[in-house]
Image (tube, rainbow, N blue to C red):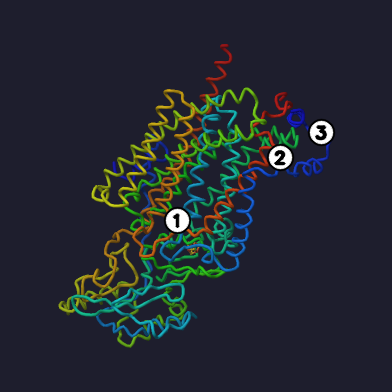
Amino acid sequence: MNRLNFLRIAGLAGATLTMGKILKASPQKSNKAEFVGVLYDSTRCVGCQECEIVCAKEHGLPKPDPEDYPTTKEVRKANEKRRSVINAYETSKGELYIKNQCMHCNQPACASACLTQAMHKTEEGPVIWRDNKCMGCRYCMVSCPYDVPKFEYHSSNPNIEKCNMCFDRIKEGLQPAFVENCPAEALTFGTRRELLAEAHRRISSNPETYYDGIYGENEAGGTGFLILSAVPFEEIGLNTKLQKKSYPELTKGFLYSVPSVFVLLPAILLGIFKATKKRQTQEEENE
Amino acid sequence: MNSIENIASRDNAGQPIWKFLMSELKPRGKYFTPFNIISVPIILVGLVLIVIRFIYGIGSITNLTQEVPWGLWIGFDVVTGVAFAGGAYVITFMVYILNIKKYHSIVRVTVLNGFLAYVFYAGALLLDLGKPWNVINPIIGNSFGVSSVLFLVAWHFLLYMMAQLIEFSPAIAEWIGAKRARKILSSMTIAAVIFGITLSTLHQSGLGALFLMAKEKIHPLWYSEFIPIMFFVSSIFAGLSMVIFEGSISHKVFSDQISEKNHKAHKGIIHGLSKICTIAMFAYFFLQVLTFVHGKHWDLLNTPMGYWYLTEMIGFVLLPMILYFYSYRTQNIFLIKLAAIITMIGIIINRLNVTVIGFRWDAPNPYYPSWMEIVVTLTVLFIEIWIFRWIVRRLPVLRESPSWVKDH
Ligand code: SF4
């Protein structure tokens, strides 16, 4: 018996729940439309923060403070006023830069967590947030393994801030602003498949430059933001402990068990109710 | 005494309903009780804080951070509060489904408690929402996030509140003397009970399932895929311990409401509940041990969090379990009450460990609730107790139903 079955059986409806067949069947929705994404080649990044500046301009966020630049002394963090930051790390290959932003997961935890579909994985690929649907519960923040969504704690009508890959521009056929404006050509926009092929090509043609791996190829079930690195990922602060399965997978067992509990449990309760009532009336007659 | 007799047997036939309701609205009882003296100032401060929160945002009175977006209001008010409200589904299960008559006299007060708990914790949830006016989105319209555990929990809260209101409604009908309505409403009880138990099973475990996706964020000693089962099983004894605790207080505070017969029966009820608690806690402890062995986190035991984990498991699960068992065998009512209190503290610790203390335990700037968050929490709690008291003094909750009920 695998663990999920144990969960269903032991926890939710007692040993009578043996409806594994119904529960198991539900194949993954195959993604026919191809997702677009961004390939970030951190070996090319010069840490100029141009992407930070254009991002703020594009999304009407406060202009970045020029005094606040990446240093190896401190890890800068995205917050409700900046959706993306560049950090510097001292590594085995010297000082390197890394961009931190939303990973645009193939199966995002935040979107499956959101109870209003405000957080939404578009057919095109970017994960976007929609103001008019959000109720500000912050469950997306609890669920996101990368801690990406940020909340305006000091507003009476707070928004969630996160990178949306400039979704409005993509719909107009443009590239995301931060990709277009990168002077070092560290960022490439394209379909996820093309980007993975390109990344593999770069690694194999320049094995001494690149660490052999693409961050985001399998992390959290695969992401739309893909990262190439010169050094092992931990050295530039990327979380390598994340699971390879997608995060919504973790709640599937529970959610699948709900319909069967809803069917079986009332039936069982009604059965017991009838039985105890009958026994009682019999006892009363006997008296 | 005379006036209580009067209320108990009233059927309001002659009196216009609005006149009756107006007269009922007036406060009764003493003004300067210790509870009032403590609660009124706190409620006033709390209300001011709530106004500030709506003007300047959630961050103005809470210590929440971008890493720890859920704090005391969710972890204590909602998650812990709902566990304590679990008594209602357990007691209705025993009385209506298993037909154990013994517990009948505490059904109403338990359901009322459960209902108010849900109303107020859902209310506390609204305080925690950034855009509370959008709370209707998951309920009506085209914004159903059906793959969300929170969606499920939200709907279950709503439906369960209705089920509990139906379960409680005969008391309201008796209060205003609506004989026919009472008959119709009480015929709906069984359906509401069955529905309510099903909903409870799912959302008690659902509250645990909420945290399944926060896999790397919760300390490994508390995170496991079994959180939903643990939350469900522990809600049984959490709820019953609350019933024991609340019952003991009610029997002192509202002793004028309780008939001689029920006073006597109360010991038997507590005694019976202690047995169920023992069994449920044993199952829970067993599950916890199993999960721990399965998770292979032996090395973590010898860390500060590990000591805290052992404190919870031994001091607040194993110990009260043994205490329940011992006091059940020796019929020691005092020890049962003590076990109930330790169990309740244990539940608070457990829920906070999963949702707040163990959540991002490694964050560079850990979250501690601000005093204002605590005051708002107390405000919610005190207002709930005020309403509870108001209802118990007026409706046939603890006292017997009016005499006309038995004619039917
Ligand atoms: S905060 Fe908004 S976007 Fe995030 S889960 Fe809640 S409703 Fe969805």
Q: Residue furthest left?
A: A208
Q: Residues within 10 Å of mark 1 (few under 14, many from 20)?
A: some
Percent across and percent down for residue B212 are: 38, 53
Horizontal side of B341 relative to B363 (left or right) equals right
For this view, does A74 lie left or right of residue B242?
left
- Density class for disc 2 (Cα within 10 Å; few <14, some 14-19, many ≥20) is few
Of mark 2 and mark 1, the one earlier in the sequence is 2
Disc 2 versus disc 1: distance between alpha carbons?
Answer: 50 Å
Which residue is labeled 1 in the image? B147
Q: Is residue A2 above or below residue A218?
A: above
Q: Amino acid at mark 2?
A: Gly
Chain of the residue where label 2 is placed in the rendered structure? B
**Labels 2 and 3 touching (C-beta < 8 A):** no
The answer as to whether the residues below labels 2 and 1 share one chain is yes
Marker disc for residue B13: 3
Place residue B12 in its image quadrant: top right
Marker disc for residue B29: 2
Q: Position of residue B251 (x, y in %)?
A: 60, 32
What chain does badge 1 belong to?
A: B
Work out whether A57 lies above or below B279. Answer: below
Q: Residue A192 shows which numbered tag?
A: none
Mark 2 to mark 3 CA distance (whole Å): 26 Å
Ligand 1 closer than 8 Å to label 1 CB: no
Q: Which residue corresponds to the image point at 64% horizontal and 51% vertical from the top-left?
A: B40
**Secondary structure state at the residue bearing disc 2:** loop
